[in-house]
Amino acid sequence: MRHFGSNDSPAGPADWRTLKLLLPYLWEFKWRVLIALSFLIGAKFAIVSIPIVLKHIVDNLNQPKAVLVVPLALLFGYGALRLASTMFADLRDIVFAKVTQRAIRRVGMDVFRYLHSLSLRFHLERQTGGVARDIERGAQGISSLLSMVLFSILPTLIEIGLVAGILFVKFDWTFAAITLTVVAVYVALTILITEWRTKLRRRMNEMDSKANTQAVDSLLNYETVKYFGNEAFEA
């Protein structure tokens, strides 16, 4: 339990250890993961191709002697790409849902078994409420972490690479350089703000667990509280 709650920086070794611990749970469904990643890449290719097809549609419609078949074919292609981007994203979620839920269930069971292996001293401290809240928060965190890494960060990197490549090929290299520079500055600023916010978030989680521990343990010891007339003190 202390392993996940270490005082490493938000972008430090603790994050990599957490991802490393989750890899065996993900690799149990490696084919689902690979298929979901292929759908993800397909969706990004479709999204990046949409403006290119739209450009060709406009160029063909602007020609006085343009054959009607060409703009119509491009128009159907544009619609197919729009459909493909949405369809691939939905298929990715369908395929990966089982992986996420299985990982949450397996980690939750491992934590539950670990709690049963702890000494009597730990359980006599009656931290039931805080531990239950931490397990619930951890399960939600696993889902958020996997979604963020696989469906947000990785797709964004792929899309940035594709767009930078198109700008480099179709335009001057300075367009690609400016785009990558702006993205790098945005990422650096996001990391700085996230690190600052994470400290506040950790403090909030600690206070939330402490309050939940007090409330649950007070209700579990309802008879003792009533016996001493300690309701006001507990509140």
Image (cartoon, grey):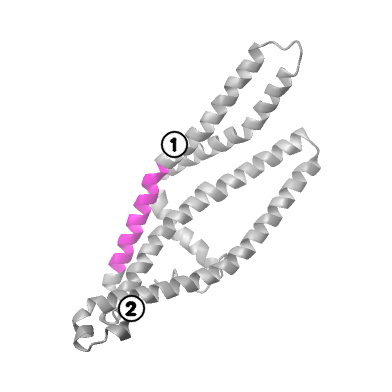
User: Mark 1 = which residue?
Assistant: 91
Q: Is residue 97 magenta?
A: yes
Asked whether disc 1 touches disc 2, contact meaning CB atoms under 8 Å apart, the reply is: no
Q: Residues within 10 Å of mark 2 (few under 14, many from 20)?
A: some
Q: Is residue 31 visible?
A: no
Percent x, y for residue 146? Answer: 46, 53
Left-right relation of 74 to 22:
right
Percent x, y for residue 203? Answer: 49, 74
**Residue at figure coordinates x 30%, y 84% from the top left:** 232
Task: Tell me which amino acid carries mark 1.
Answer: Leu
Residue placed most toward the observer, 181 or 208: 208
User: Mark 2 = which residue?
Assistant: 214
Q: Is residue 67 magenta?
A: no
Left-right relation of 96 to 58:
left
Give the main secondary structure of the magenta stretch: helix
For the N terminus, the quadrant is bottom left
Task: Tell me if residue 165 comes above or below residue 125 in the rendering.
Answer: above
Dot placed on the residue nearer the N-terminal end, 1 or 2: 1
| Quadrant of residue 163 within the rendered picture | top right
Task: Tell me if residue 208 comes above or below residue 160 in the rendering.
Answer: below
For the C terminus, the quadrant is bottom left
**Residue at figure coordinates x 48%, y 63% from the top left:** 17
Q: Which residues are magenta?
A: 95-114
* 3D distance between C-alphas at marks 1 and 2: 44 Å
Q: Secondary structure at mark 2?
A: helix
Q: Secondary structure at mark 1?
A: helix
Percent x, y for residue 209? Answer: 39, 73
| Quadrant of residue 226 within the rendered picture | bottom left
Task: Tell me if residue 234 comes above or below residue 22 in the rendering.
Answer: below
